[in-house]
Amino acid sequence: MSTYKILVICAVIAIAAIGIITVLSLSKGVISTQDYSIDVDPLKDPQNLFVTARVMIQNTGGKPLTNIVVNFGNGELLQLGTLTPGQKVILSPPQDNSLEQVVVTADNGISVIKEYRLAPKMVGMMGS
């Protein structure tokens, strides 16, 4: 009977650990470990006749980010202003942009350079 109890206790500990890890990974932007942090996710999705693109920017820090500037490339700049902790914006790049990379800068030494990633293609979806 004692082996059964040990096995149940180990299973409960494993389930609790998995739950904690899941909650922490899903709380990105809610539980901040740094005062100033930003997440940038540029995405492009080439279709047969056109390309759709978007840039998601989120303040993942614990304090507001100020003077945010988004450089889409090709001389295209956007003064975004301020993002409060956890706030997320989704932007569309200007038309006829090369869609190579995005540079996001802000006060307090924030500078992120990201290349556009391609959207995953799934069977039955438009453009696949």
Image (tube, helix red, strand yellow):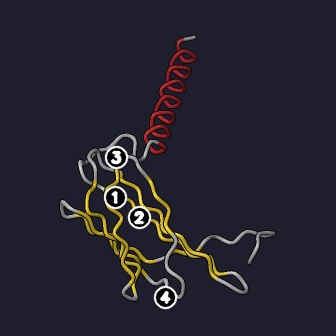
The residue that label 1 is drawn on is 38
- The residue lying toward the viewer, choosing from 83 and 15, is 83
**Cα–Cα span, label 3 and label 1:** 9 Å
* Type of amino acid at the residue the image marks with label 1: Ile
Q: How many marks?
A: 4
Q: Residue 114 in the image: x percent, y percent? A: 39, 74
What residue did someone put label 3 on? 85
Disc 3 residue type? Pro
Q: Position of residue 66 (x, y in %)?
A: 26, 57
**Helix or strand or loop: what does disc 1 sit on?**
strand
Whole-Å distance between the Cαs marked 4 and 3? 31 Å
Expressed as whole percent of the image width and height from the top left, the position of residue 41 reads: 46, 66
- Pointer 4 with pointer 1, Cβ within 8 A: no
The residue positioned 29% from the left and 55% from the top of the image is 37
Q: CA distance from mark 4 to mark 1?
A: 23 Å
- Which label sits in the foreground, 3 or 1? 3
Q: Vertically, is 22 above or below 87?
A: above
Q: Are marks 2 and 1 in contact (CB under 8 Å)?
A: yes
Residue pictured at 52% horizontal, 71% vertical? 92
